[in-house]
Every structure is written in structure tokens, then in C-alpha cells.
């Protein structure tokens, strides 16, 4: 009769290995129960991880779209705030300049013109605003401020209208300078530093937003035109002819008031862009929630099955410890 036996040292190693396996299983099951996700995802999916990989890739894409949409929303809000401030400045100054009384003195004309110069400086400051280090009204050249300073513009216009003696001629000359095409030495060449196209941003699956409002937009250019026209008196233009100076201020005020609907339309365009961005954000959040639910379904561990497996592992470990305890108490006399 063949008797097979195992030595004490070998038995100790075998018991230690069994204990280690059970403890590892128990730790894995405990981690699954606390996290709610299976530890061996490949085994759970039978090696077919294509669906899960597709979900993860789409979630990453939606996360990028979310960031783009947040940036576009901040950009559009900055533009809307700037346009609102410009409209407020233009309407306030426009009314004051247009209804200036006929008995206006030279000193009052100069004061009103200085007010227009301050308004021009404020509007250019709004135009040169930025969000997240991107200038709002520079178009594709978003790393560059769109406009030179108000002082530079007025210095250029002062030289352009130098020698003109009537308000009509000055208004026409200023208008021609602002409306001149590229290469003609006007506003586009001297004062504008931005790009010609708008900023295009992908903000969702199949959704792209284009923020096309720049400092070259006609409504903004006409606001600058009216303010600059009124500010020329502060530079000494028509200083010796109060009557022509008053007509110049009234013409500038009327131009600012006439341009108000165009500014409102520009605000509406930006407002529509904000609506598209908000809709895209809502759709993106809904899609992300759906995909996260699908991903969790693939990765989640069954809490009831996991709890049962933990109980089974604990029972095995307790049984193993009982066996080890009984073996450690055996004596040679008991064996014989």
C-alpha cells in the first residue's frame, strides 16, 4: 500500500498560498462592492470591449465640446455686454448732441465735444476687451486688440479734415475715411488690427457657432464714426465758427441715433448665437448623461451577487483557519 504524505513545511506553504488567494479574492470583491464596478472588465465583457471603447471615446468628445461651448458662451456674453455698453453710450451722447440748443457757445461746444471724445475712448475700450486672453472683436486675429487708441484715430482724422470749413464737408470726409475699403488708407488700414473673418467654434455634435461681429461690423463702425465726428471740435476743428460747430455736433448726434437700430440688430445676432450655444450645452449634457448610464451598466457590479461572493469567501477563509488550527494541535501520538 502506497502512503503519500506532505511535510510540515510544505503544508505550511500550501496553507499560506490558499489563505493568500482567498484574501485576494475577498479584497477584490470588497473593492467591487464599494466602487460599484467590476474589477475584471475584460472578463465581464467577454473580451469584447468595442462598445465600451466607443462610449468612452464619445464621452471624451462631448467633454471637449462642453469646454468649447463654455468658452463660446463666455465670449458671446462678453460681446453682448460690450454692445450693450456701446449702445448706451451712443444713445446718451446722441440725444445730447442732437438737441443742443441753437444758442450754444463755443465753450459749451468744446465741452460737449470733449464728452464725445471720452465716449469714443470708452467705446474703443469696450471693443478692445478680451475673455480668456482672446479679444472679442478681432475676428480670426483674436490674439490682437482690434483697434488703435482713440487718440490715434482722432489725430488721423484731424489731419484728414484739416482745411475744411463746413460741417457738411467734415461729416462727409470722416464718413469716407471710415468707409474706405482696404488699401485706401482709411479706417481698415489705419485703425483696425484684427482679422476679417469671424471666430468659428465647434460646440456640439454637428453644431458650429460663428461669432462674426468685429470692430469692422457696419453698426460698430458707424458708432465710432459718430463719436469721432463730434470729438473733432475738441481737437480745434471749426473752433472759430460756433454755428458750423453746432451743426457738426447735431449731425454726429443724428448719426448716432440713426445707428441705434443697427446696434440692436447686432445684439440680436449675438443673442441668437447665445441661444444656439445654450441649446447645444443642454443637448450635450443630456447625451453625456445617457452615455454615462450606458457605461455604468456595462461596468457595474451586481451588489447582491458580490455580497454573496464575499460571504462565501469569508466562509472559506474561516474554514481554512479552522483546518490550520486543528492541524497545528495534532500530536505524534494522535497520528500513530
Image (spheres, grey):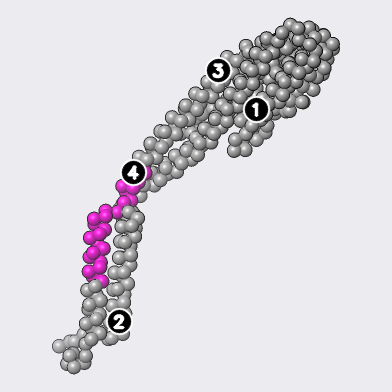
Please tell me in which quadrant of the rendered image residue 30 appears. bottom left
Sequence-earlier tag: 1 or 3: 1
Instruction: Give how far apart the Cα atoms at labels 1 and 3 are.
Output: 17 Å
Q: Secondary structure at mark 3?
A: helix
Q: Are marks 2 and 4 in contact (CB under 8 Å)?
A: no
Which residue bears the numbered disc 2?
Answer: 12
Which residue bears the numbered disc 4?
Answer: 293
Q: Are marks 2 and 1 in contact (CB under 8 Å)?
A: no
Eye-nearest disc, 3 or 2 = 3
Q: Residue at x 42, y 33 (%)?
A: 282
Which residue bears the numbered disc 1?
Answer: 127
Q: Secondary structure at mark 2?
A: helix
Sequence-earlier tag: 1 or 4: 1
Instruction: Give how far apart the Cα atoms at labels 2 and 4 are.
Output: 47 Å
Eye-nearest disc, 2 or 4 = 4
Sequence-earlier tag: 3 or 2: 2
Image position, residue 29 (x, y; %)? 30, 61
Direction left: furthest residue: 1
Q: Is residue 322 left or right of residue 148?
A: left
Residue bounds of the magenta highlight: 291-317
31 vs 8, nearest the viewer: 31
Q: How many other residues sit within 10 Å of disc 2, few (<14), some (14-19) or many (≥20)?
A: some
Sequence-earlier tag: 2 or 1: 2
Please tell me in which quadrant of the rendered image residue 233 appears. top right
Amino acid at each position: 500500500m502506497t502512503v503519500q504524505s506532505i511535510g510540515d513545511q510544505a503544508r505550511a506553504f500550501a496553507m499560506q498560498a490558499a489563505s493568500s488567494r482567498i484574501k485576494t479574492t475577498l479584497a477584490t470583491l470588497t473593492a467591487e462592492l464599494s466602487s460599484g464596478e467590476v474589477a475584471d472588465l475584460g472578463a465581464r465583457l467577454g473580451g469584447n470591449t468595442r462598445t465600451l471603447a466607443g462610449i468612452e471615446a464619445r464621452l471624451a468628445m462631448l467633454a471637449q465640446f462642453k469646454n468649447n461651448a463654455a468658452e463660446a458662451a463666455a465670449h458671446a456674453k462678453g460681446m453682448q455686454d460690450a454692445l450693450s455698453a456701446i449702445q448706451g453710450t451712443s444713445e446718451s451722447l446722441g440725444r445730447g448732441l442732437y438737441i443742443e440748443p441753437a444758442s450754444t457757445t463755443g465753450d459749451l461746444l468744446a465741452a460737449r465735444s470733449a464728452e464725445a471724445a471720452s465716449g469714443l475712448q470708452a467705446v474703443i475700450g469696450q471693443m478692445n476687451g478680451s475673455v480668456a486672453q482672446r479679444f472679442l472683436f478681432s475676428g480670426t486675429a483674436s490674439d490682437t486688440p482690434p483697434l488703435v487708441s482713440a487718440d490715434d484715430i482722432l489725430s488721423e482724422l484731424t489731419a484728414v479734415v484739416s482745411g475744411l470749413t463746413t460741417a457738411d464737408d467734415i461729416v462727409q470726409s470722416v464718413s469716407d475715411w471710415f468707409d474706405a475699403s482696404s488699401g485706401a488708407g482709411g479706417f481698415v488700414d489705419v485703425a483696425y488690427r484684427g482679422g476679417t473673418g469671424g471666430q468659428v467654434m465647434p460646440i456640439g455634435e454637428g453644431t458650429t457657432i460663428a461669432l462674426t461681429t468685429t470692430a469692422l461690423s457696419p453698426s460698430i463702425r458707424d458708432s465710432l464714426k459718430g463719436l469721432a465726428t463730434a470729438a473733432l471740435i475738441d481737437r480745434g476743428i471749426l473752433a472759430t465758427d460756433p454755428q458750423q460747430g453746432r451743426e457738426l455736433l447735431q449731425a454726429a448726434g443724428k448719426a448716432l441715433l440713426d445707428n441705434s437700430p443697427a446696434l440692436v440688430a447686432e445684439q440680436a445676432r449675438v443673442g441668437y448665437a447665445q441661444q444656439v450655444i445654450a441649446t447645444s450645452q443642454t443637448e450635450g449634457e443630456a447625451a453625456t448623461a445617457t452615455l454615462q448610464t450606458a457605461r455604468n451598466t456595462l461596468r457595474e457590479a451586481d451588489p447582491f451577487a458580490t455580497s454573496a461572493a464575499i460571504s462565501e469567501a469569508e466562509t472559506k477563509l474561516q474554514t481554512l483557519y479552522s483546518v490550520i488550527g486543528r492541524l497545528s494541535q495534532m500530536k505524534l501520538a494522535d497520528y500513530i
